[in-house]
Image (cartoon, rainbow, N blue to C red):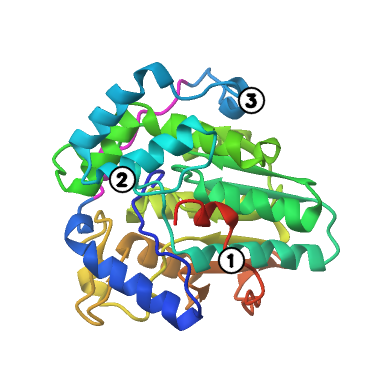
Amino acid sequence: MDTNEKTSNKQVNSNQTSKNESVKKNDQNAEARIEPADASSQPEPAAANSQPQNIVAEEEDKTFDCPNMEAMLQNIRSHERITDQDLEEFKRCILNDKVYFGKVMFATQGVPDRHRVMQALVREKRKEGFDSISIMEIGTWAGGSALTWAESVTKYFDNNGDVICVDPLVPYFDKNIDRSVYVAMRNALKEGYIVDLLLHNIKCSGHGDHIKLMKCPSDFLIPMLKDEQVDILFIDGNHNYAAVKKDLENYSRIVKEGGYICGDDLELHITDIDIEQARQHLNYDYIQDNKTERFYHPGVTLAVGEFFNEHVSEREGLWVQRKVNGKWQNIEMPDYSDIPIPEHFLANT
């Protein structure tokens, strides 16, 4: 997505268990997630004469409007299938300045082990001798991936680096979609709750100094970006085919020589799937593949497979390519067995 729904599992003890848990969770949510992500429903582009601003810096003192907490909770309850316990945990974290990545607003997104792989990529850049790092991600939601990147900047680069997040954070799902997950996420965007939660999580994480949040559509920044300026580019925005393809075409040029371009939610490779079925569902977020009977994001699989024209490097659903002599190449995926799941994923488990 700029705000695409993904599910999360609790910490697991092995790579295979993580994958099994992920498939199981995906199957449980399949009915709610097999929905079209209508490309015509994209947010309005920013005005040509406006400049995107780092809203983390602009609103660093902003917190949830606690006097209206009960009204917000009532609104969320009316749009989400959650328990009183879920809401109480959310409220506790907000009032006590704790990060929140629980069930409310589908704040927890992504498989936890995938975030270990992300941090392993950052560690690889450190091993190469770099003393600073620049990371950009497209798609942020509640900040789970942003905090993963920022935590790795602290761990491996002694706080010497930046994470730039790009997300319009406005409703864009087709209004005809009435499945529960999309209703919940659309409401969180419409009411501005997810922006408040994102800023809250950044502020309370202790990593806010590394994060810049550009609240704008991804294509709006393109004219302002120089070639080869980031070490890692993470694409996790709108998952329909046209949007993923556009992000790949627009942003790949900003990756430095030797840098990584990577992305989320590659459950199946283009060589695995029923291609004809996928092409009939280009604007669908999540479907079940006829060939493998597994659930996956057809837009991600098709766009990534076509852009790189090969079976890309992948681990735990995180795909990666490296720029070598101006061309994209597969990599040997780094070992992450000694990297713990990021702390913010464990806060609400």
Compared to residue 242, the image places residue 178 above or below, namely: above
The reply to whether the C-beta atoms of the residues labelled 3 and 2 are less than 8 Å apart is no
The amino acid type of the residue labelled 1 equals: Arg
For label 2, the crowd category at 10 Å Cα-Cα, with few meaning under 14, some 14 to 19 and many 20 or more, is: few
* Residue 184 as seen in the image, left or right of residue 22: left
* Residue sitting nearer the eye, 130 or 321: 130
The amino acid type of the residue labelled 2 equals: Gln
Separation of marks 1 and 3 at Cα, in angstroms: 28 Å
Upstream in the sequence, badge 2 or badge 1? 2
Secondary structure beneath dot 2 equals helix
Upstream in the sequence, badge 1 or badge 3? 3
Q: Nearer the viewer, mark 2 or mark 1?
A: 2
State the image coordinates of residue 39 (x, y, percent, origin top left).
28, 44
In the picture, the disc for residue 85 is: 2
In the picture, the disc for residue 57 is: 3
* Residue 143 as seen in the image, left or right of residue 253: left
State the image coordinates of residue 244 (x, y, percent, origin top left).
41, 54
In the picture, the disc for residue 116 is: 1
- Which stretch appears magenta? 37-47
Compared to residue 194, the image places residue 293 above or below, namely: below
The amino acid type of the residue labelled 3 equals: Ala
State the image coordinates of residue 339 (x, y, percent, origin top left).
65, 69
Q: Quick check: is 218 in the magenta stretch? A: no
* Residue sitting nearer the eye, 107 or 245: 107
* Residue sitting nearer the eye, 24 or 94: 94
Q: Residue at x 66, y 52 (%)?
A: 151
Picture quadrant where residue 68 is located: top left
In the picture, the disc for residue 90 is: none
Separation of marks 3 and 2 at Cα, in angstroms: 33 Å
